[in-house]
Image: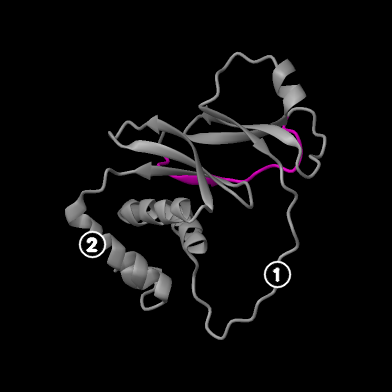
């Protein structure tokens, strides 16, 4: 696959029958490899069990649909990026130079129990594609584990801290 990481949002209805999911309904989520990318499908269990297909999913897991909650409005004197918003921005940039930062942010979020690792797959670069699901939104993140060496970890940690604290912007870090 050309993309080393990306985000796929959870659907609010079955990809097969189109019926809206009820809060806390069991569902089947999967990633399907399509030309140069991944397609996410979220299906009711009944539809998935009856669905005839001539392809195998790239990754497949059982889940529970959680209806979105209204967003809370919080006023902060100085807006700082959270690890999740920074991860989303970096994934949207698709900058290979930020590969290590993306991976470290994903691991931070996994350890903080915000992301759940659903699957792993070998990548053509020799790394591992880690498939995470956001515990709250249900979004799927495909992140390349670049097999970061310990001697480079301190530099990446400094980049992450600078970006999260607001002492550096993405534009400054790229420069």
- The numbered dot on residue 72 is 1
Q: Is residue 8 magenta?
A: yes
Pointer 2: residues within 10 angstroms few (<14), some, or many (20+)?
few
Furthest residue to the bottom?
A: 77
Q: In the depicted view, which residue is nearer to us: 48 or 23? A: 23
Q: Which of 90 and 78 is in front in this view?
A: 78
Residue 102 placement (x, y as % from top left): 39, 54
Quick check: is 65 in the magenta stretch?
no
Q: Residue 13: percent from the left, percent from the top?
A: 76, 39
Q: Residue 48's spot in the image, x, y percent?
A: 70, 23
In this rendering, does residue 15 appear at all?
yes
User: Could you tell me which residue is drawn at 42 percent across and 41 percent down?
Assistant: 3
Q: What stretch is highlighted in magenta?
A: 3-15
Residue in the picture at 81% in, 41% down: 22
The x and y percentages for residue 1 are 41, 33
Label number found at residue 154 = 2
Circle 1 — which element?
loop
Magenta portion: prevailing SS class: loop
Q: Is mark 2 on a helix, strand or loop?
A: helix
């Amino acid at each position: 696959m050309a993309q080393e990481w990306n985000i796929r949002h959870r659907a609010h209805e079955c990809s097969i029958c189109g019926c809206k999911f009820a809060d806390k309904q069991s569902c089947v989520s999967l990633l399907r490899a399509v030309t140069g990318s991944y397609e996410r499908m979220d299906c009711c269990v009944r539809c998935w069990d009856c669905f005839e297909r001539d392809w195998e999913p790239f990754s497949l897991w059982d889940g529970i649909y959680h209806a979105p909650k209204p967003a809370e409005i919080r006023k902060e004197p100085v807006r700082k990026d959270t690890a999740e918003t920074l991860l989303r921005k970096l994934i949207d940039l698709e900058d290979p130079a930020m590969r290590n930062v993306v991976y470290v942010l994903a691991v931070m979020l996994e350890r903080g129990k915000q992301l759940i690792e659903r699957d792993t797959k070998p990548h053509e670069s020799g790394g591992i594609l880690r498939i995470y699901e956001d515990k709250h939104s249900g979004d799927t993140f495909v992140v390349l584990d670049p097999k970061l060496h310990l001697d480079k970890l301190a530099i990446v940690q400094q980049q992450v801290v600078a970006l999260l604290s607001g002492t550096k912007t993405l534009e400054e870090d790229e420069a």
